[in-house]
Every structure is written in structure tokens, then in C-alpha cells.
Image (cartoon, coloured by chain):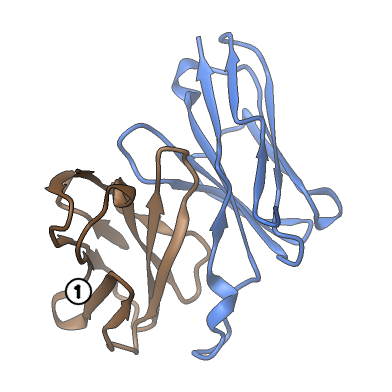
Amino acid sequence: AQKVTQAQTEISVVEKEDVTLDCVYETRDTTYYLFWYKQPPSGELVFLIRRNSFDEQNEISGRYSWNFQKSTSSFNFTITASQVVDSAVYFCALLRQAGTALIFGKGTTLSVSS
Amino acid sequence: DTGVSQNPRHKITKRGQNVTFRCDPISEHNRLYWYRQTLGQGPEFLTYFQNEAQLEKSRLLSDRFSAERPKGSFSTLEIQRTEQGDSAMYLCASSLGRPYGPTDWAKNIQYFGAGTRLSVL
């Protein structure tokens, strides 16, 4: 069975703090893809990143960084020096190589206060 | 705006009425997906199209739901005899299609619209 778990339901931080959003996935597939999406109050899911299962290199994009560890089936997302505009619901998702449907976690609501 | 467009953004209806939502995908995308998202949950897959063909439906798509994608362009999702349990955000996404190898990076990213929020009274 495929499953994505985001154990943190809500996180509140003060601006400029670093914050890490956890994602743990389950799959028996050897090839799969992992995604992070951001959903601001407007409702649109905004694509942030995709990783392939065979590429465990961590990635940094500005204030965002992702840590992919197959050994622990985790794909965590860190925001450095958080800003109020980072306030949103963040979803981790899994896609099988032969699949079409994204399997989402329940999301983590991040609130950044000034 | 060249992103995925959904209309209407909000729909309020009475139980038992029929409703129809529209999705216009990114123009060069051949795959189109419908998801449903309820409060506090992640989106759940409903169905997808490859061009005009509906190739997969989830168990969530009851007989009261029907989706079409005539001519492989825009898509409509109709819910007949709405029930209060149908209240949710209906999200549409599009992509270039399934990757066939590790280098087909661009082909399986799904881009989402802003959704249609349905409230059934």
C-alpha cells in the first residue's frame, strides 16, 4: 500500500525562525517520485519540488531545502528564516512510476507571525 | 494567465440539485486530473484523462459523478443529485504525461488550479 504521513498537523513560528516539515512515506515500489506542494489561503496547490527515488541528493532553493533519506523513507522540508508569506498548508505527495494519482499526506499548516 | 483555470470558484447548491464544474488545463498538457479535498485532508484522486479518454476512476467517483473531456481540451465534472457529503473543494490538475524513464523529468509534474468550493445545503 502507498501512504504518506505528515505527523505535524500545525506548526507556529515567529518570523526568521527556521522550521522543518516532516514527511514519511510508504511504498514497495523501487521507483517512485516525491513532491511538495504549498496551498496558500487562495486554495491553489503550488508545486515546489519533485524528487526521484534514485536521486538522494539534497536540494536547496533559496530559503527552501529538502532532505531525502530512503533509509528512513523520509522527505523533509526546511524553510530557513521563515517569513509571513510562508504561512500556508504544505503537502507532501507520492507518485508511483506506473501511477497517475498523487497520494497526498494530510498536510501541515504553517503559521508564521511577525 | 496560462495556468490551470477552474470555474466557478464557489458553488452553493441545495441537496438534490445537479452541479457542473469546468476545468481548463495548461494548453500543451495532454493529461487532466480531478481531485477532491475535504477540510483538514489532502486531495484525493477522483479520475484522469489522457487527451479525451478517461483512463482511470477511483472508488470515490460514485455513479452520481461524471466527468468528460471532449476533444481533449477542457473538462467538466458533473455531480447529480448532490448530497451534503459532496461538500468539498474540487481541484483540477494537468500534466504533460507519464514519464517513461528516469530522464523524463518534466512529464509527471501535476499543476493545479485554484479549485471549485462546493457547499451543499
Farthest residue in the front direction? A114
Q: Quadrant of residue A53?
A: bottom left
Circle 1 marks a residue in which chain?
A
Q: Is residue B114 above or below residue A67?
A: above
For the image, the number of numbered tags is 1
Which residue corresponds to the image point at 47% horizontal and 38% vertical from the top-left?
Answer: A42
Image position of A113 (left or right of B46): left
Instruction: Tell me the SS state at disc 1.
Output: loop
Q: On the rendered image, what quadrant is the N terminus of chain A found in?
A: bottom left
Farthest residue in the right direction? B71
Image position, residue B113 (x, y; %): 58, 47
- Front residue of B107/A66: it is A66
Graded by Cα atoms within 10 Å as few (under 14), some (14 to 19) or many (20 or more), the crowding at tag 1 reads: some
Which residue corresponds to the image point at 40% horizontal and 44% vertical from the top-left?
Answer: A40
- Front residue of A88/B120: it is A88
- Front residue of A76/B62: it is A76
Image position of A91 (left or right of A21): right
Q: Is residue B66 above or below residue A29?
A: above
- Chain A drawing hue: brown
Which residue corresponds to the image point at 47% horizontal and 76% vertical from the top-left?
Answer: A97
Image position of B80 (left or right of A28): right
Image position, residue B21 (x, y; %): 68, 33
**Mark 1 belongs to which amino acid?**
Ser
- Front residue of A13/B114: it is A13
Image position, residue A95 (x, y; %): 42, 68
* Residue wearing tag 1: A73
Image position, residue A69 (x, y; %): 19, 80
Q: On the rendered image, what quadrant is the C terminus of chain A found in?
A: top left
Q: Quadrant of residue A80?
A: bottom left
- Chain B drawing hue: blue
